[in-house]
Image (spheres, rainbow, N blue to C red):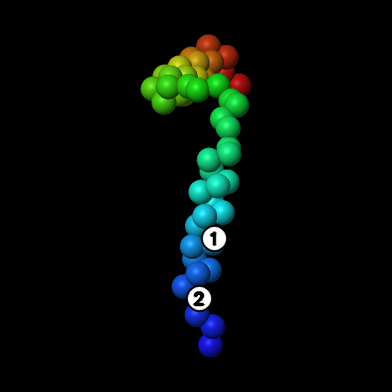
Amino acid sequence: MADKKDSGFQSGAGLIRYFDEEEITGPALDPKLIIYIGLAMAVVVELAKIFWPV
Protein backbone atom coordinates (compact mmCIF):
# COMPACT_ATOMS: atom_id res chain seq x y z
CA MET A 1 0.00 0.00 0.00
CA ALA A 2 1.34 3.44 -0.90
CA ASP A 3 2.15 6.01 1.74
CA LYS A 4 -0.25 8.97 1.30
CA LYS A 5 1.59 11.33 3.62
CA ASP A 6 2.91 13.50 0.74
CA SER A 7 -0.37 13.78 -1.21
CA GLY A 8 -2.07 16.01 1.41
CA PHE A 9 0.79 18.50 1.38
CA GLN A 10 0.76 18.79 -2.41
CA SER A 11 -2.97 19.47 -2.58
CA GLY A 12 -2.70 21.96 0.29
CA ALA A 13 0.14 23.78 -1.42
CA GLY A 14 -1.93 24.03 -4.59
CA LEU A 15 -4.82 25.63 -2.71
CA ILE A 16 -2.55 28.12 -1.00
CA ARG A 17 -1.01 29.04 -4.34
CA TYR A 18 -4.48 29.41 -5.91
CA PHE A 19 -5.86 31.69 -3.20
CA ASP A 20 -2.72 33.84 -3.14
CA GLU A 21 -3.13 34.59 -6.85
CA GLU A 22 -6.84 35.35 -6.68
CA GLU A 23 -7.69 39.04 -6.94
CA ILE A 24 -10.93 40.61 -5.81
CA THR A 25 -12.15 42.84 -8.62
CA GLY A 26 -15.68 43.50 -7.41
CA PRO A 27 -16.81 46.41 -5.26
CA ALA A 28 -16.12 46.09 -1.54
CA LEU A 29 -19.38 46.70 0.31
CA ASP A 30 -19.86 46.95 4.04
CA PRO A 31 -22.02 44.06 5.34
CA LYS A 32 -24.20 46.57 7.21
CA LEU A 33 -25.00 48.25 3.90
CA ILE A 34 -26.36 44.98 2.52
CA ILE A 35 -28.63 44.60 5.56
CA TYR A 36 -29.88 48.19 5.20
CA ILE A 37 -30.60 47.72 1.49
CA GLY A 38 -32.57 44.54 2.25
CA LEU A 39 -34.61 46.29 4.94
CA ALA A 40 -35.30 49.25 2.65
CA MET A 41 -36.46 46.92 -0.12
CA ALA A 42 -38.76 45.11 2.32
CA VAL A 43 -40.33 48.43 3.34
CA VAL A 44 -40.80 49.44 -0.30
CA VAL A 45 -42.51 46.12 -1.10
CA GLU A 46 -44.83 46.37 1.90
CA LEU A 47 -45.75 49.97 1.01
CA ALA A 48 -46.42 48.91 -2.58
CA LYS A 49 -48.83 46.25 -1.30
CA ILE A 50 -50.72 48.89 0.67
CA PHE A 51 -50.89 51.58 -2.02
CA TRP A 52 -51.33 49.30 -5.06
CA PRO A 53 -53.39 46.29 -3.99
CA VAL A 54 -53.90 43.66 -6.64
Q: How many marks?
A: 2
The residue shown at (53%, 68%) is: 7
Which x, y percent locates residue 31?
A: 41, 26
Name the kind of residue labelled 1 in the image: Ser
* Mark 1 or mark 2: whose residue is earlier in sequence: 2
Which x, y percent locates residue 53?
A: 56, 18
Secondary structure under the numbered disc 2 in the rendered image: loop
In the rendered structure, find residue 11 and report the number of the disc placed on it: 1
Nearer the observer, 34 or 1: 1
Estimate the spatial distance between the alpha carbons at disc 1 and disc 2, rounded to whole Å: 12 Å
Name the kind of residue labelled 2 in the image: Lys
Secondary structure under the numbered disc 1 in the rendered image: helix
In the rendered structure, find residue 4 and report the number of the disc placed on it: 2
Question: Does residue 8 lie above or below 54 as drawn?
Answer: below
Which x, y percent locates residue 35?
A: 41, 24
In the image, taking residue 39 as reference, residue 19 lies left or right, namely: right
Q: Is residue 50 visible?
A: no
